[in-house]
Amino acid sequence: MSSGVTRYDSLTALTQGEKSQSLSAGFGLALGVFDGIHLGHQAVIDAARGEGRTGVLTFDPHPVQVLAPDRAPRRILASLEHKEKILADYGVDFLVVMEFTKAFSQQEAALFAEALRNSGVKRLSAGEDWSFGKSRGGTMTRLREWCPEVVVSPVPAVMQNGERISSTRIRQSLRDGNLDAAAQMLGRPYAVYGEVVQGQQLGRTIGFPTANVSLSEELLPANGVYQVEGRWSQSWVRGVANVGVKPTVENDGRRSLEVHFFSEETPASYGWFTEISFLKKIRDEKKFTNLEALKAQIQRDVESASSS
């Protein structure tokens, strides 16, 4: 599944790459971490549109993981590779990934602003409270002063039910099993992205072969059985997924994601990547007395996921 987004690893690479596009109109650039790319992030991206191509500049790893690892979330909402897929769906042309280190955090804010100005950007956007550089010396107000020839757009927080939409709130909604709340803040169903790896191959012995999806650092929703959609090319395929510890057949306590797709075109090999979108929860995970009872329940789960 091609993302359709060009990735650059520095502002210098961006400048060279965008010049090769021969676009005299320049480009717009949205700045931030963008974990999950929720409605607030989308508002920032929209503010960067209107000047040729539209790009996103983000940081990896997450700045909190470097500056305050004890406060960093254990799981994120979208890996870098997954961000590319989401951004492509949202009409973003390119992604600039800046390596975030302690040394980078100590760089004077004015130097980063100069690099932005020299990149050829015509429009910059970020959250109105976004700050950058040594001692957080860079603000959107200062950025406007440092880049007078660039349209700088500070974007207010997007609110929902009187509260600011945030990645933290989305993570909590997923832990609580509230898919609807997460989807409302994201503007789409929550999804994860991972590699299909070899498992116990138990599913195929009871008539329901599954893809074991290995995630790197993305957050799984609460344990249970879900109606899902997956894609590994351009089309979404309906399926049913189990999130949890598989208590009927395993008891090592490790959480996993297994998906049974309603398609005969699922790749038979391993090592391919898929995006799994969680549509609704069907039931909680439970332990069955034997495999026959498990098989009967999976059949009911498939019927439930197929009929709605």
Image: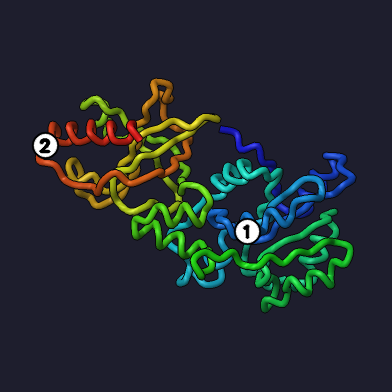
Left or right position of 29 against 59: right
Query: Quadrant location of the N terminus?
Result: top right
- Determine the secondary structure under disc 2: loop
Q: Position of residue 240 (x, y in %)?
A: 33, 36
In primary-sequence order, the first of circles 2 and 1 is 1
Residue beneath the point at 35% across and 43% down: 257
Q: Position of residue 176 (x, y in %)?
A: 34, 60
- Asked if residue 98 can be seen in this view, the reply is no
Q: Residue furthest top?
A: 264
Q: Which residue is mark 2?
A: 290
- Asked if residue 281 can be seen in this view, the reply is yes
Q: Is residue 2 above or below residue 84?
A: above
Q: Is residue 300 above or below residue 44?
A: above
Q: Which residue is mark 1?
A: 59
| Circle 2 residues within 10 Å: few <14, some 14–19, many ≥20 | few
- Determine the secondary structure under disc 1: strand
User: What's the amino acid at mark 1?
Assistant: Phe
Disc 2/disc 1 C-alpha distance (Å): 48 Å
Residue beneath the point at 87% across and 47% down: 25
**Circle count:** 2
Query: Quadrant location of the C terminus?
Result: top left
User: What's the amino acid at mark 2?
Assistant: Asn
Mark nearer the viewer, 2 or 1? 2
Q: Nearer the viewer, residue 64 or 174?
A: 174
| Circle 1 residues within 10 Å: few <14, some 14–19, many ≥20 | some
